């Protein structure tokens, strides 16, 4: 069956793309997600020993791979692109709860299906897998939802980020946030401060959003962005060389001071560097995105971005379990046949992810009954309550990844679902006139 049976052809995609569409931002967004999928596939290792599933990654034993995280830790670019794409749709007089609800409606729609899958799958697997195989699988199941929780909280802050209208405000916002993270790091490194203090550094994810606003409002020119990226690269290298920061920008068990969870000053500097280099590269990326085939792949990919991101983890776990039980674990990089096995697993993952993308992408794009249609027509207490509940859902989503679908993680997921249901009930369907007000507050493309 032809590809066009599932997707529009390149000419149709091109014809339906507005002339004002920022194609570079769309390319950055989908490339960052594809990079995550490929990175997880390449780095993940596993083995089953004495009915114990050991899930690890190549970073633990390879300094070279740890150094490569300075190139392939590109998650800040998704936050950058996401805020850049949506900041112009926010207006000071708009309903905050409605604005955030419309974005969360799209973001969480595939998550409901994802949770339903994992709850069902784990209920079955509990009876077939040994305890110490089942527990790691349950823990990994929703680990990647950290991104969604953090992203929702960043989107909730867009009304504040939108106030960055001058270069001076940009410098103040970025420098102030960077300084705050530096103070938190200094306290937690040099004192016996509670571990929870480090999670104040989650504000680091606002920095890509700030630079996304700066990009959209042309506050940073290409040469200035290139210079900023170079300066931050030097600062980051200095921090690692003289400070307690470790090389890998992806968390690994051997790290005493993790850069990722919670975010460190080094990760904040990395976010500035990556976004600055992205701004400098936008003209070239935009020209590349004008190619019909490139734009077709970009548009199709973005239409199922959450599908791609969510469902690659079940595919990756399933593949590893099958290989492990068949006696072909991919675990030690120096083992005989490791390279051939890696290539084979990459090929298998490409097939699994492509199949999942084609089959499940409609779940992301088709309205979900009872979830779609929420509206808060005007600013006020109800709008604020909806926004706060969505923030609670984001925070609970973020917290759940520490345990997965077991133990306290189940309570976090329950809080997330309760907050989402509460927000949807408050954002109840309004009369037709109110629905028109909600629709009129949005541009033709909300991205």
Image (cartoon, rainbow, N blue to C red):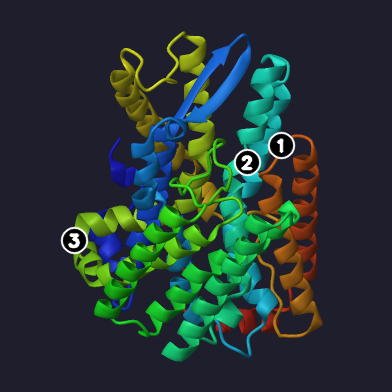
Label 3, label 2: how many angstroms apart (C-alpha)?
Answer: 36 Å
SS under mark 1: loop
Q: Which residue appears at 72% of the width and 72% of the height?
A: 387
When asked about the image quadrant of residue 144, the answer is: top right
In depth, the one of 179 and 398 nearer the eye is: 179
Q: Residues within 10 Å of mark 1 (few under 14, many from 20)?
A: many
Left or right: where does residue 71 sit relative to residue 400?
left
Q: Find out whether the residues at labels 2 and 1 contact each other: C-beta distance under 8 Å.
A: yes
Residue 59 locus on image (x, y percent): 44, 35
Label 1, label 3: how many angstroms apart (C-alpha)?
Answer: 43 Å
Residue 241 locus on image (x, y percent): 41, 54
Q: Is residue 50 above or below residue 257?
A: above
Say the numbered circle drawn on residue 142. Answer: 2
Q: Which residue is mark 3?
A: 291
Q: Is residue 304 above or below residue 17?
A: above
Left or right: where does residue 16 sit relative to residue 124?
left
**Disc nearer the start of the sequence (2/1):** 2
Q: Nearer the viewer, mark 3 or mark 2?
A: 2
Q: Which residue appears at 21% of the width and 65% of the height?
A: 290
Q: Is residue 1 visible?
A: yes
In depth, the one of 363 and 312 nearer the eye is: 312
Q: Which residue is mark 1?
A: 405
**Disc nearer the start of the sequence (3/2):** 2
Q: Which residue appears at 70% of the width and 22% of the height?
A: 124
Q: Is residue 100 above or below residue 363?
A: below
Q: Is residue 155 above or below residue 37?
A: below
SS under mark 3: loop
When asked about the image quadrant of residue 194, the answer is: bottom right
Q: Is residue 371 visible?
A: no
Left or right: where does residue 412 sit relative to residue 157?
right
Residue 391 locus on image (x, y percent): 71, 65
**Disc nearer the start of the sequence (1/3):** 3
């Amino acid at each position: 069956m032809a590809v066009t049976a599932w997707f529009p052809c390149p000419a149709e995609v091109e014809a339906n793309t507005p002339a004002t569409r920022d194609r570079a931002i769309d390319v950055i967004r989908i490339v960052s997600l594809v990079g995550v999928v490929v990175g997880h596939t390449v780095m993940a290792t596993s083995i089953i020993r004495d009915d114990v599933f050991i899930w690890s990654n190549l970073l633990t034993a390879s300094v070279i791979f740890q150094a490569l995280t300075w190139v392939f830790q590109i998650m800040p670019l998704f936050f950058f692109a996401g805020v850049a794409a949506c900041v112009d749709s926010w207006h000071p007089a708009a309903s905050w709860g409605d604005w955030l609800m419309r974005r969360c409606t799209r973001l969480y729609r595939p998550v409901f299906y994802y949770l339903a899958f994992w709850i069902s799958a784990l209920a079955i697997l509990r009876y077939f897998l040994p305890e110490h195989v089942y527990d790691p699988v349950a823990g990994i199941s929703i680990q990647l939802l950290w991104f969604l929780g953090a992203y929702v909280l960043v989107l909730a802050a867009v009304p504040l980020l939108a106030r960055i209208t001058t270069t001076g405000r940009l410098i103040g916002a970025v420098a102030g946030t960077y300084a705050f993270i530096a103070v938190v790091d200094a306290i937690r490194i040099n004192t016996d401060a509670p571990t929870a203090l480090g999670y104040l550094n989650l504000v680091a994810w606002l920095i890509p959003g700030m630079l996304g606003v700066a990009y959209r409002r042309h506050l940073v020119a290409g040469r200035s962005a290139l210079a900023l990226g170079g300066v931050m690269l030097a600062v980051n290298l200095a921090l690692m060389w003289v400070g307690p920061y470790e090389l890998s920008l992806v968390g690994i068990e051997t790290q005493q001071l993790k850069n990722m969870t919670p975010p460190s000053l080094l990760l904040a500097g990395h976010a500035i560097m990556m976004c600055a280099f992205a701004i400098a590269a936008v003209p070239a990326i935009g020209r590349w995105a004008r190619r019909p085939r490139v734009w077709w792949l970009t548009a199709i990919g973005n239409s199922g971005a959450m599908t791609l991101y969510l469902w690659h983890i079940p595919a990756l776990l399933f593949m590893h379990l099958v290989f492990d039980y068949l006696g072909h674990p991919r675990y030690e990089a120096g083992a005989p046949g490791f390279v051939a096995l890696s290539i084979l697993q990459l090929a298998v993952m490409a097939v699994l992810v492509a199949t999942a993308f084609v089959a499940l992408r409609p779940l992301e794009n088709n309205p979900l009954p009872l979830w779609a249609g929420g509206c808060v027509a005007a600013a006020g207490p109800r709008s604020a309550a909806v926004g706060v509940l969505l923030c609670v859902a984001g925070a609970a989503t973020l917290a759940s990844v520490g345990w997965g679908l077991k133990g306290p993680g189940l309570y976090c997921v329950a809080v997330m679902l309760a907050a989402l249901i509460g927000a949807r009930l408050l954002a109840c369907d309004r009369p037709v006139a109110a629905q028109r007000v909600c629709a009129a507050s949005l541009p033709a493309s909300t991205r």
